[in-house]
């Protein structure tokens, strides 16, 4: 598999990666400017020159991935006898500058439960983002190809779930998925809130509705065993609090803006919380 095929592979399998490109060469080097390779957490594809050069690039790329760094950076390495290289000597005599570009191959998962007026508007907005967008509804008529045609044109990868018992679809979602609960039935909403709070690996959980609805839901959820700490995981009413309009399009804009903030915050977090963001590297690693 070459580096270009590797990009598609990482996108399809939702894995992080870094594209490493030989940006410039001074003197002699094993590969020319423009050579590329792709690095994932456990594999590499293609080559930028092998030896210490390539191993140092892989180590740096994986440090960027683990720390959740999104910005590209340059890494310059000397290929001489005097260079204090960690992975063996390369005596080509030159200097190579590599460009390391973290890839946007990991798409977050967002699930909209309830594809009514607001849900459809929200789906259309989110369909423009590079996400896995799940549309779940107990009503098959809400999920017809004709009704969802506009959503198919966007950047999102669409997953349609007709589920007579919507909370069962929660088990189809990967860890870290973000949910927005806005079904046509408050009983469905309550069942979804209960089931979602029993899955600690889920991400953001938002519930549409009034403050009165949320007060009543809190009483119901406490009655089935949920604690105050559990309830803190659920945001209701979902959306930006200072936007007051109740029209479907404006509610959807408000919720979409809140979700974008959630996605940006999640994107900047490290894959492993104990990992500190690496400092910029230049010269000998």
Image (cartoon, rainbow, N blue to C red):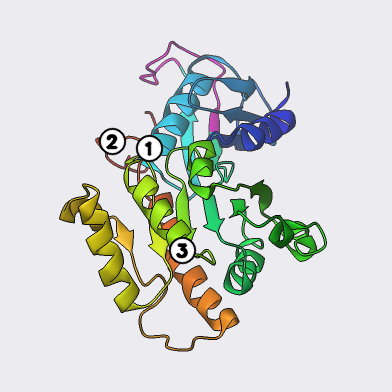
Q: Nearer the viewer, residue 156 or 208?
A: 208
Residue bearing the label numbered 3 = 259
Q: Residue furthest top?
A: 88
**Quadrant where the N terminus is found in the figure:** top right
Secondary structure of residue under mark 3: helix
Residue at 65% in and 57% down: 139
Q: Which mark is residue 39?
A: none
- Residue at 60% across, 48% down: 164
Which image quadrant is residue 264 in?
A: bottom left
Task: Please state the horizontal and vertical placement of residue 97, each as a whole percent of the image.
Answer: 54, 37
Label 2 element class? loop
Marks 2 and 1: CB-CB under 8 Å?
yes
Q: Quadrant of the C terminus?
A: top left
Work out how far the residue at label 2 is from the one at label 3, CA to CA, in angstroms: 25 Å
Is residue 255 depicted above or below 23 in this figure? below
Q: Nearer the viewer, mark 1 or mark 3?
A: 3
* Disc 2: CA contacts within 10 A as few (<14), some (14-19) or many (>=20): some
Would you say residue 153 is visible in this rendering?
yes
Residue on which the image places disc 1: 271
Label 1 sits on a secondary structure element that is loop
The quadrant in which residue 14 appears is top right
Question: In the rendered structure, which segment of residues is drawn in magenta?
Answer: 81-96
């Amino acid at each position: 598999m070459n580096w270009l095929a590797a990009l598609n592979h990482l996108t399809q399998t939702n894995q992080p990666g870094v594209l490493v490109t030989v940006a410039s060469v001074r003197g002699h080097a094993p590969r020319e400017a423009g050579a590329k390779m792709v690095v994932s957490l456990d594999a590499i594809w293609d080559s930028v020159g092998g030896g210490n050069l390539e191993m140092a690039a892989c180590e740096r790329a994986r440090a960027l991935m683990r720390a959740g760094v999104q910005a590209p950076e340059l890494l310059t390495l000397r290929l001489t006898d005097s260079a204090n290289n960690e992975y063996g000597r390369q005596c080509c005599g030159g200097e190579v500058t590599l460009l390391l570009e973290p890839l946007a191959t990991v798409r977050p998962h967002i699930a909209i439960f309830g594809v009514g007026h607001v849900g459809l508007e929200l789906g259309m907005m989110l369909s423009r983002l590079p996400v896995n967008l799940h549309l779940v509804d107990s009503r098959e008529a809400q999920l017809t190809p004709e009704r969802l045609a506009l959503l198919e044109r966007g950047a999102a990868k669409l997953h349609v779930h007709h589920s007579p018992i919507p909370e069962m679809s929660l088990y189809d979602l990967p860890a870290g998925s973000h949910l927005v609960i806005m079904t046509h039935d408050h009983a469905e909403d309550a069942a979804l809130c209960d089931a979602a709070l029993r899955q600690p690996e889920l991400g953001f959980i938002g519930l549409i509705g009034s403050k009165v609805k949320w007060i009543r839901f809190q009483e119901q959820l406490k009655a089935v065993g949920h604690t105050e700490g559990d309830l803190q995981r659920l945001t209701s009413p979902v959306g930006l609090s200072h936007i007051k309009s109740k029209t479907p399009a404006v509610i959807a804009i408000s919720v979409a803006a809140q979700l974008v903030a959630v996605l940006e915050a999640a994107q900047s977090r490290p894959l492993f919380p104990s990992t500190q963001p690496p400092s910029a590297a230049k010269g000998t690693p």
